[in-house]
Image: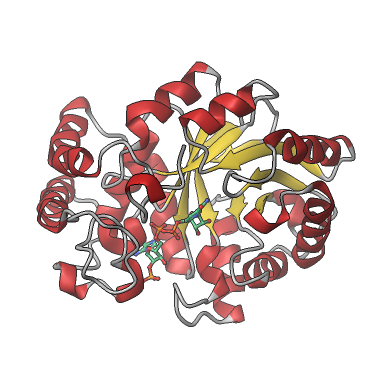
Amino acid sequence: MRYTTLPGSNIRVSVIAMGCWALAGDSTWGEQSEADSVAAVRAALDAGINFFDTAPGYGDGVSERRVGLGLRGVREQAVVATKVGPDALRPEKLVASVERSLSLLGTDYVDLLQIHWPSREVPLAETWGALERLREQGKARALGVSNFGKLDLAELLERGVPATNQLPYSLLSRAVEFELVPACLARNVGILCYSPLLWGLLAGSYRTPDEVPAGRARSRHFAPSRPQTRHTEPGCEAETFAALARIRGCAERLNVSMSELAVAWLLHQPAVTSVLAGIRRPEQALANARAADLSLDAGTLRELDEATSAVKQALGANPDLWQSGSASRYR
Ligand SMILES: NC(=O)c1ccc[n+]([C@@H]2O[C@H](COP(=O)([O-])OP(=O)(O)OC[C@H]3O[C@@H](n4cnc5c(N)ncnc54)[C@H](OP(=O)(O)O)[C@@H]3O)[C@@H](O)[C@H]2O)c1
């Protein structure tokens, strides 16, 4: 495993983090046992992954509680990131939300406390002020944001610099490259990449759009006729599966798995601090940890750029994976 520092802090994190949303076993992810969740956390630690990302919104505290169980007795070895959700951005509610997170996680501080989504109702100054007070009290070691587009980030930067901005970033979701990567680089804000495997598509789990389960086939890659979609764009299914075929070919040539290649590619992109790979079973912890050691040459990086540029162009500069046009939650 390789380690880096969260920008603006002395907190050392593994470049592969364990994304803990699926530990919730909610409607998005399907059933997930407590035993598998604890085993996955332990396997991640054994593989050198010390960075764990969760949120109160993941199963209304179920993911946080399971992360806490997995880290019982070894909490000090871990860097724990959680969030405050859209309903908890006013100072009083925010403090209550963080106290609940601490109790569920079984700890008296989190290492990285993030705003999950920007608010269009609560002034950012109120929320950021409350977060800074929690940092002064030692309840959060560093502060970050998530899903902050160019304008939201610029507004925040007038008050303070977040350590990180957690954004959707993968070979098949490259919208952040248009504006956000340069904006983050300019102010030393690290990017934490979420959905790096596009829910298993980039692990080669599905050969055709019809094979992708309903909850995972609702992003803007897919036709709007698919169940649960919230966008009104045509989708880019043909481009997506053509790109996947080329990525598969590249992985075969290098004799690595597609997931390893997809995660390693992110680690070669500027501004990326850590890749939050969704991990719910021990073998996924091991497989994703391996990507940290995979070095890609310039020819391979060019090949992957070309393989995915049609999808990048089709989806454009809107980073919202699920909502299009004026409904995009990015600003
Ligand atoms: N800030 C936000 O708004 C936001 C939004 C989304 C996610 N996130 C964070 O980012 C994390 C990761 O994103 P994600 O969970 O959406 O998606 P992801 O990492 O792209 O995909 C996770 C899924 O990919 C499959 N997978 C993982 N490793 C694999 C491997 N080595 N081989 C084959 N399949 C593998 C698993 O599918 P199976 O379930 O089929 O095993 C897993 O559930 C989340 O857990 C969360 O911490 C944040």
Q: Residue furthest top?
A: 186
Q: Residue furthest right?
A: 137
* Residue 271 point in image, percent of width and height: 45, 27
Q: Is residue 172 above or below residue 238?
A: above
Q: Quadrant of ligand 1?
A: bottom left
Q: Is residue 38 above or below residue 106?
A: below
Q: Front-most of 277 and 35?
A: 277
Q: Judge whether residue 257 can be spotted in this image.
A: no
Q: Judge whether residue 184 can be spotted in this image.
A: yes
* Residue 107 point in image, percent of width and height: 81, 58
Q: Is residue 281 above or below residue 75?
A: below
Left or right for 41, reference 300: right
Give the residue displayed 47% in from the left and 78% down from the top.
27
Give the residue displayed 41% in from the left and 42% down from the top.
292
Q: Front-most of 138 and 330?
A: 330
Give the residue displayed 41% in from the left and 27% down from the top.
181
Q: Front-most of 105 and 77?
A: 105
* Residue 276 point in image, percent of width and height: 48, 50
Left or right for 236, reference 130: left
Number of callouts: 0
Colour logic: secondary structure
* Residue 67 point in image, percent of width and height: 66, 65
Left or right for 304, reference 35: left
Q: Front-most of 142 and 162?
A: 162
Q: Quadrant of residue 137?
A: top right
